[in-house]
Image: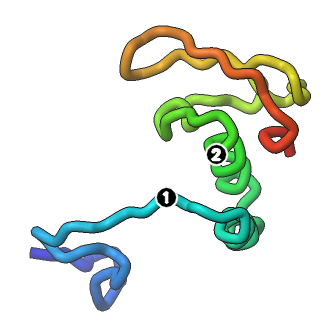
Amino acid sequence: MLDFEDNRSEPNPNHPKLGDTIKVEPIRTINGINKIKKALAPSPRNLALFVVGINTAYRASELLSIRLKQVRHLAPGDRLEIKQKKTKKYRAVTLNNGSVL
């Protein structure tokens, strides 16, 4: 049963119905990546999370744990070290040109 007390008159059409499955495909082309970047451009935070994510292969939980003070000073070639939530170990990546906006 859906509850619409948050002032929406109908369910979000982008959410699957209960019991439905969703097929997710990887982004396979540079054009596809550029389309997503363009769509995310109005939100610098989301754009940065996407760009860092596709260039580092960090998990979503790891990306969300990053704080501005950790990355503000980084340049291509620098290492970013994040503690993994899944394993509790630190995982470092060397940032490439694409991961630094």
User: For this rendering, which residue is in front, 54 or 45?
Assistant: 54
Q: Which picture quadrant has residue 64?
A: top right
| As drawn, 32 above or below 58 | below
Residue at the far top in the pictured view: 89
Q: Amino acid at mark 1?
A: Pro
Q: Which mark is residue 54?
A: 2
Element type at marker 2?
Answer: helix
Whichever of callouts 1 and 2 sits on the residue coming sooner in the sequence is 1
User: For this rendering, which residue is in front, 98 or 28?
Assistant: 28
Residue 61 image position (x, y, % from top left): 47, 34
User: For this rendering, which residue is in front, 95 or 69?
Assistant: 95
Q: How many marks?
A: 2
Q: Nearer the viewer, mark 1 or mark 2?
A: 1
Q: Residue at x 31, y 90 (%)?
A: 9
Q: Quadrant of the C terminus?
A: top right
Q: Residue at x 62, y 42 (%)?
A: 53
Q: Amino acid at mark 2?
A: Ile
Q: Which mark is residue 26?
A: 1
Query: In whole angstroms, how far apart are the C-alphas of marks 1 and 2?
Result: 11 Å
Residue at the far front in the pictured view: 28
Q: Residue at x 75, y 71 (%)?
A: 38
Residue at the far bottom in the pictured view: 9
Residue 50 image position (x, y, % from top left): 64, 51
Element type at marker 1?
Answer: loop
Mark 1: few, some, or many residues within 10 Å (few <14, many ≥20)? few
